[in-house]
Image (cartoon, rainbow, N blue to C red):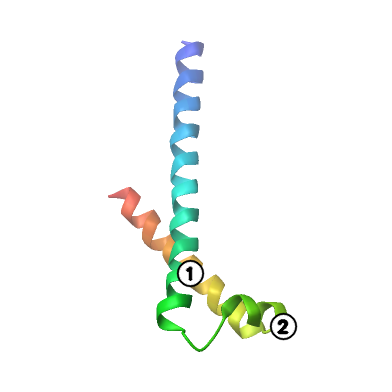
Amino acid sequence: METEFLAASFLNLAINLVYTITALMVGVYALKWVDKKLLRNVDIEEEMKKGNIAVAIFASTILIFVAIMIAFGFRG
């Protein structure tokens, strides 16, 4: 019984890890896409280096939005 529980726990951990990595990759890709396609006149990375807090909040909001959408998508 204990080995079955450990195997199920490790399988669940592996599935969650794959979901997390997928969500992270999609979030970063979405941020890059928004930066390239929608914000042609604003370079997010350069503005962050300058210390622009508004751009950092915008970028984090995009990542949170993508994470929420992916979470609901994985739940079905």
As drawn, is 76 to the left or to the right of 58?
A: left
Amino acid carrying label 1: it is Lys
**Secondary structure category for the residue under label 2:** helix
Indicate the position of residue 59 as horizontal and vertical percent values.
Answer: 54, 74
Label 2 crowd bin: few (<14), some (14–19), many (20+), radius 10 Å: few
Which of 51 and 43 lies nearest the eye of the viewer?
43
Residue 49 falls in image quadrant: bottom right
Residue at 48% over, 33% down: 14
Residue designated by label 2: 50
Indicate the position of residue 40 as horizontal and vertical percent values.
Answer: 46, 85
Which of 44 and 73 lies nearest the eye of the viewer?
44
Q: Residue furthest bottom?
A: 41
Residue at 66% over, 82% down: 53
Residue at 45% over, 27% down: 11
Residue 66: which numbered mark, if any? none
Residue 74 higher or lower than 38, as above or below: above
Q: In whole angstroms, how far apart are the C-alphas of marks 2 and 1?
A: 18 Å
Residue at 45% over, 76% down: 36
Residue designated by label 1: 32
Residue 37 higher or lower than 73, as above or below: below
Amino acid carrying label 2: it is Lys
Label 1 crowd bin: few (<14), some (14–19), many (20+), radius 10 Å: some
Residue 65 higher or lower than 54, as above or below: above
Disc 2 + disc 1, Cβ < 8 Å: no
Q: Residue furthest left?
A: 76
**Secondary structure category for the residue under label 1:** helix
Indicate the position of residue 48 as horizontal and vertical percent values.
Answer: 66, 78
Indicate the position of residue 33 as horizontal and vertical percent values.
Answer: 43, 71
Residue 16 higher or lower than 55, as above or below: above
- Counting residues from the start of the chain, the first of labels 2 and 1 encountered is 1
Residue 43 falls in image quadrant: bottom right
